[in-house]
Image (cartoon, grey):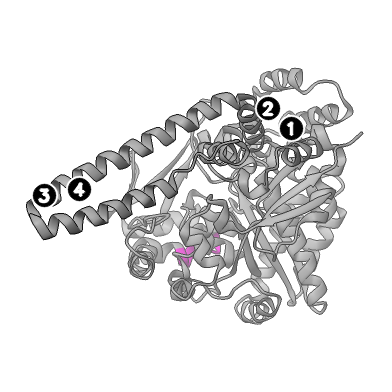
Amino acid sequence: MTKEFISFAKTGKFSSLLINYLENHKAIRPFFNRTPTFENFKLQCDEKQAHFSASQRSLLVKTLKRQHQLLPNNHKVLKHIDALSEANAFTVTTGHQLNLFTGPIYFLYKIIDTLILAQELQKKHPKKTILPVFWMASEDHDFEEVNHFYFKGQKVRWESKEKGAVGSFSTKGLDVLLNHFAKVLGKSISAQTLKKWFKESYFSHTTLSEATRFLIHQLFGEYGLIILDANDPDLKRSMIPYFQKELFENTTFETVSKTNQKLLKALGSHTDIQVNPRKINLFYCTDQQRNRIVQKDNLFTVLNTNISFSRQEIMDEMDQNPERFSPNVLLRPLYQEVLLPNLAYVGGGGELAYWLQLKSTFEHFCVPFPILKLRTSVLLVSTKQAKKIKKLALTYADLFLDSSSLINYRVRAISNIDIDFTPQKEMLSNQFRQLYDIAEQTDASFLGAVKAQEKKQRNGLDALEKRLLLAQRRKLADEVRRISDLQNDLFPNKSLQERQLNFSELYLEYGEELIPALMQSFNPLQFEFMILELNQQN
């Protein structure tokens, strides 16, 4: 097992906003609280402890015990939940949508990062108790994002006509999908384990939330991972004061809109704003529906329904049925930090981008803003692939180039002729500078003709260079094909591997050693892209 690293900036796969955050650029500093260092976590503990009450702990522990009581082999998790009762106990948290069979493998990377970070913080601060939490996005309603995963380039898709929050979707009918999936898995020991996990998760549990909790526990229960489903009436009740401010004062809209303007001013108008706030960032949930709440005149109306409330009626509804009110992507982080004695959130680049919009919202509500930790990104390379890379004289940095640039670069490197016309183009520029001088001294009206001639000859050189490169690529077709095949293997669909592969494909190769090997390899406070060569099981 060997590791190499490349800076996030050099991969070309991450936004300038994220790079600025990782590099602690002064322009981005007003939009977060503390950087993720061991020293800052101590300060975060002190701040969070002062803002998290015993009653909040009691509610959290009671809810978590109820949600975990039926999970098998849950002793370590229950021990962790009990530990949350103490005033010096804190959490580090990650979360994700309820992707079918975990979806892309970075689902696992986020959890592993969180587990390792909790362990490392515990070592650094032995008088504190630091515990890992996974937040299930059970209220998400984008079924198209969670209803599939990829296995060996093929999309394994779940069809359902249900609507509303995906956590309540019935798992009925997934046996058809398993039958198809089982055929392509094969009959190895690892394949049998995967079939068992799929069947026990989705056949023995009636909703997607229950199935996902069970599957995550199967994978990470031995590490004591706490899994929280916040779509709970008792937990929602604790959010009523915040939800009411959202309804009646448009708090998130006001604070985030101002922050967005500050982001654009600090980083430039080209900066992509991750999420634009709505006047009211709450949904109303009924069976099979999760619809936005909007205010029209003096009524609060649920879009695409006949449901509407007066101010007093919606207050009464919230008091009687708090579970029917659901935060959107901008309000959910506040919900998380109100519920948990949390120090840090571990998320991907897109997640951190919208967290950076929220600091002023947290300040308005007097809730501590957590440390933001970019999850580890990994390119897993097999021993066979590593040998190919070495044989082709490529570096890992080379492989992050777009395919055309990589191939042209390698063709130039291995060609027996120099197909780089840069010197000729420089010579051409020098010659035309002299012609410009002559034209100015004789008749300035000829400057346009000289410029046109320069452009014509430069275009001719560009075209000739491209034709020669193409001809050389044809001569070196075998080399080009091997480079292309290797890059396509490592970057399926021209995307980062971690965004495409499902863990099941890797589990077939590495077996039960996959997660322990990843646990051993991750260093959550090393902020570089990791290339990890894993030895395959015999």
Question: Which residue bears the numbered disc 3?
Answer: 446
User: Which image quarter is the C terminus in?
Assistant: top right
Q: Which residues are magenta?
A: 237-242
Along the horizontal axis of the image, is 414 left or right of 464?
A: right
N-term mark: 3 or 4:
3
Question: Which residue bears the numbered disc 4?
Answer: 451
Q: Residue 272 in the image: x percent, y percent?
A: 39, 55
Query: In terms of depth relative to the viewer, which is nearer, 237 or 523?
Result: 523
Please, what secondary structure does the residue beneath circle 1 have?
helix
Query: In terms of depth relative to the viewer, which is nearer, 31 or 309?
Result: 31
Residue 505, numbered label: 1
Please, what secondary structure does the residue beneath circle 2 have?
loop
Compute the Cα span from label 2 to label 3.
Answer: 62 Å
* Amino acid residing under circle 4: Lys
Quadrant of res 225: bottom right
Secondary structure character of the magenta stretch overall: helix
Q: Is any atom of residue 237 visible in this view?
A: yes
N-term mark: 4 or 2:
2
Judged by depth in the image, the label closer to the viewer, 1 or 3, is 3
Q: Residues within 10 Å of mark 4 (few under 14, many from 20)?
A: some
Along the horizontal axis of the image, is 93 left or right of 72?
A: left
Q: Residue 7 in the image: x percent, y percent?
A: 61, 59
Residue furthest out toward the right = 538
